Image: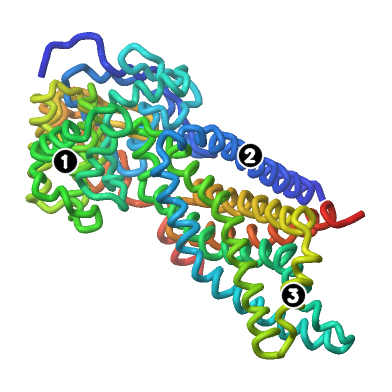
């Protein structure tokens, strides 16, 4: 963790809705440089949507998102694409191109954007794959990879252009304990070794709290709590307590809203 | 009453929005075409996928359609003692109508549906989003080469269809039914006009190629990212393309051959 400086990402008063469903109503966030910031919350709270808003793939209804001092949604297409070259994003599915090999997937952004000679690209790709432990899998097709391996290849690809920031969308979901451990270690070590800034969107409390420097908890369109992981684990706020400890009932009720049981039963 | 009116209005707005999105997509695809000249490899790969892989079905269908034309044409023409003009009849029907139209219908079924499913699945598996986040514009990188490949392949496929159809007609007419060899070719040569017949056929197939590929890409790009959504989009591609081809064929024929 480095000292607090001007945040890399500044989200202010963000409002976003899809059709009639309100996803965010007045979210404020700061993502500090060099930190791993976790954004947590139950499924369906729009965590992935937040990453897409930061990456400029979606437009907010109101509010601003600044990345490295630039208002993402006021940039022209060319500038937005320039900014995206400095952001990596790891999708939940990996989002690898399925018709080309692991090597070509990692080489893809380098070939598209750098104009480097093929010999140099070859070396860079091998180094990136080595960092995620998959140099030996370079000739495999994405279909032949396990879910965890696909995410690691996608991570190598996201790092190919040496971005300033990587956004991870639910990196731990659906992983076996071993690949979970590998991913946790990788995200932590890459952030430190490459002086990255990381945003991890997740609902896996244990794994995320291990590596995060700061945690935001989002629920029902708002930031309901924030703090260092240890503060969050011991927080008294009812929502945070329920979420961090995985309690079945609390501010987020166990029961989906319904008429009273007796009425429902007697009604038929 | 008001409700029905409102519903009608909503449907109308939905259709207009659809058309608008389709045209905007076409514009951005066209904007991505110049970049393909710097990277012809992207285009060549797609011409293979869209055009070369459709060749077999086009060739086989063309041959059979030509054979049927030879057979039917012979029975009708021979009633008037005009079986020597069989070559003209077969060639004119193929070059003017059946070549472009049937090839386009087969193209929509073979290549159009494949394009929609491919693009739709790329959307459903976040590959298109992934490209955007890698600062690669998927419309330019994925859609534009496929569009141009469809536009180039369609007239060639229609030409193959017509050429093999003529051979099929020749095989049945001359080979099996005994029409005079020289008359078959010389009548065809004398009556089929390069501008009137061949060029108009090429224009038709260019238009059909544009429309079929455009519909396929649009449906794939805006498909709901679920398996059901992709399956519906694929069906829509075949249905919309076929109707568009048949409707446009009438309009184009009226414009080209009507006085």
Does any portion of residue A45 appear in the rendered image?
no
Distance from disc 2 to disc 1, alpha carbons, whole Å, reads 51 Å
**Res B86 quadrant in image:** bottom right
User: From the viewer's perspective, is B188 left or right of B30?
Assistant: right
Q: Chain of mark 2?
A: B
Which is nearer the eye, A215 or B51?
B51
Give me the chain letter of mark 3.
B
Instruction: Tell me if B159 is positioned left or right of B111 in this view.
Output: right
Q: Position of residue B65 (x, y in %)?
A: 65, 76
A262 vs B181: above or below: above
The image position of residue A64, as x and y in percent, is 42, 18
Q: Secondary structure at mark 2?
A: helix
Residue occupying the point 31% across, 42% down = A252
The residue depicted at 41 percent of the width and 53 percent of the height is B121
Viewer-nearest residue: A126 or A23: A126
Report the side of B59 relative to A223 (left or right): right
Query: Which numbered mark, 2 or 3, is in the foreground of this view?
Result: 3
- Going 16% across and 37% down the picture, which residue do you hit? A122
Give residue A83's position: percent from left, percent from top. Answer: 34, 21
Q: Which residue position holds label 1?
A: A245
At label 1, counting other C-alpha atoms closer than 10 Å, the crowd grade (few under 14, some 14-19, many 20 or more) is few
> Marks 2 and 3, how far apart in space?
42 Å
Q: Secondary structure at mark 3?
A: helix
The residue to which callout 3 is attached is: B87
Q: Which residue is mark 2?
A: B23
**Residue B186 seen anywhere in this rendered image of the structure:** yes
Query: Residue at left 44%, top 57%?
Result: B49
- Separation of marks 3 and 1 at Cα, in angstroms: 83 Å
Looking at the rendered image, the disc whose residue lies closer to the viewer, 2 or 1, is 2
- Answer with mark 2 or mark 3, whichever residue precedes in sequence: 2
């Amino acid at each position: 963790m480095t000292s607090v400086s001007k945040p890399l990402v500044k989200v202010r008063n963000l409002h976003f809705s899809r059709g009639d469903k309100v996803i965010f109503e007045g979210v404020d966030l700061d993502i500090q440089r060099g930190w791993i910031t976790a954004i947590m919350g139950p499924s369906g709270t729009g965590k992935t949507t937040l990453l897409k808003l930061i990456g400029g793939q979606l437009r907010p209804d109101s509010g601003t998102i600044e990345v490295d001092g630039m208002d993402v949604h006021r940039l022209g297409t060319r500038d937005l694409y320039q900014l995206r070259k400095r952001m990596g994003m790891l999708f939940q599915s990996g989002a690898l191109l399925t018709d080309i090999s692991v090597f070509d997937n990692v080489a893809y952004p380098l070939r598209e954007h750098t104009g480097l000679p093929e010999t140099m690209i070859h070396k860079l790709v091998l180094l990136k794959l080595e960092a995620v432990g998959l140099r030996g899998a370079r000739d495999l097709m994405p279909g032949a990879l396990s879910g965890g391996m696909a995410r690691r290849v996608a991570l190598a690809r996201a790092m190919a252009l040496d971005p300033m920031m990587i956004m991870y969308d639910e990196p731990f979901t659906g992983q076996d304990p071993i690949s979970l451990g590998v991913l946790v270690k990788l995200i932590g070590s890459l952030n430190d070794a490459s002086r990255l800034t990381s945003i991890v969107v997740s609902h896996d409390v244990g794994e995320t709290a291990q590596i995060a420097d700061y945690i935001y908890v989002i629920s029902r369109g708002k930031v309901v709590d924030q703090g260092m992981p240890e503060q969050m684990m011991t927080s008294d706020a009812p929502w945070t307590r329920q979420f961090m400890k995985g309690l079945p009932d609390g501010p987020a009720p166990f029961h989906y809203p319904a008429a009273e049981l007796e009425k429902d039963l007697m009604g038929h | 009453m008001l409700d029905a009116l409102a519903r009608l209005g909503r449907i109308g707005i939905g259709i207009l929005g659809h058309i608008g999105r389709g045209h905007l997509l076409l514009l951005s695809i066209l904007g991505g075409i110049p970049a393909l000249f710097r990277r012809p490899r992207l285009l060549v790969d797609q011409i293979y996928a869209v055009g070369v892989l459709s060749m077999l079905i086009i060739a086989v269908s063309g041959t059979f359609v030509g054979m049927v034309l030879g057979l039917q044409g012979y029975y009708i023409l021979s009633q008037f003692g005009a079986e020597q003009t069989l070559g003209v009849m077969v060639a004119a029907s193929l070059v003017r109508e059946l070549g472009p139209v049937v090839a386009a219908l087969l193209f929509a079924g073979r290549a159009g549906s494949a394009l929609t499913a491919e693009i739709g699945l790329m959307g459903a598996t976040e590959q298109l989003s992934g490209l955007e986040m890698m600062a690669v514009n998927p419309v330019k990188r994925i859609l534009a080469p496929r569009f141009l490949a469809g536009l180039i392949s369609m007239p060639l496929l229609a030409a193959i269809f017509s050429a093999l159809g003529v051979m099929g007609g020749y095989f049945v007419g001359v080979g099996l039914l005994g029409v005079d060899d020289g008359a078959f070719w010389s009548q065809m040569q004398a009556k089929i006009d390069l501008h009137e017949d061949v060029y108009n056929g090429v224009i038709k197939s260019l238009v059909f190629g544009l429309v079929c590929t455009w519909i396929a890409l649009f449906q794939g790009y805006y498909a709901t990212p679920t398996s059901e959504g992709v399956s519906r989009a694929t069906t829509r591609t075949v249905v919309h393309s076929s109707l568009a081809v048949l409707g446009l064929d009438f309009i184009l024929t009226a414009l080209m051959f009507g006085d």
